[in-house]
């Protein structure tokens, strides 16, 4: 199992809007989303949704599938590190192995 957590797409967006000299407040206004929502995405505390990715494409020209794929890889890496889920998967594998 890979222990490295992939980059959250919010990190990429944060760097992009900073490099373009756009404030988070201004970008939130451009997208018509609450500032807190944008800030949580940019800080990796909230996922990038399909709708949000499409709005970013309209604003910055960034391919929305890139953002969605990054979010999916991030989500999978986080899920694979959850101890309760790891234990549950072990039990499922044992139960299924006994059936076959």
Image (cartoon, helix red, strand yellow):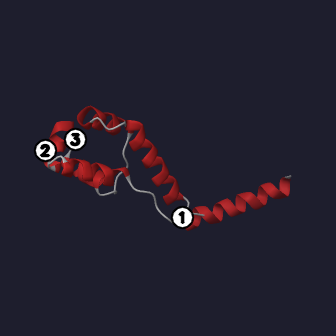
How far is disc 1 from disc 2 in space, using C-alphas?
36 Å
- Rendered image: mark on residue 52: none
Q: Which residue is mark 1?
A: 81
Q: Is residue 10 above or below residue 88?
A: above
Residue 3 position within the rendered picture, expressed as x and y whole percent measured from the top left: 53, 66
Q: Which residue is mark 3?
A: 33
Question: Please, which residue is most extreme toward the right here?
Answer: 100
SS for tag 2? helix
Q: How many marks?
A: 3
> At 49% across and 59% down in the image, what residue appears?
78
Quadrant hosting residue 8: bottom left
Q: Earlier in the sequence, mark 3 or mark 1?
A: 3
SS for tag 1? loop
Residue 20 position within the rendered picture, expressed as x and y whole percent measured from the top left: 18, 46
Q: Which residue is mark 2?
A: 26
Q: Is residue 23 left or right of residue 39?
A: left
Q: Is residue 20 left or right of residue 8?
A: left
Q: Is residue 91 left or right of residue 24?
A: right
> Looking at the image, which is closer to me, 64 or 84?
64
């Amino acid at each position: 199992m890979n222990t490295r957590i992939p980059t959250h797409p919010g990190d990429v967006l944060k760097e992009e809007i900073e490099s373009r000299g756009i404030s988070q407040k201004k970008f939130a206004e451009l997208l018509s989303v609450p500032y807190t929502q944008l800030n949580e995405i940019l800080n990796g505390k909230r996922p990038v949704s399909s709708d949000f990715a499409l709005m970013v494409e309209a604003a910055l020209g960034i391919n929305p599938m890139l953002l969605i794929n990054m979010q999916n890889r991030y989500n999978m890496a986080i899920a694979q590190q959850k101890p309760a889920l790891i234990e549950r998967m072990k039990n499922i594998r044992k139960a299924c192995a006994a059936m076959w």
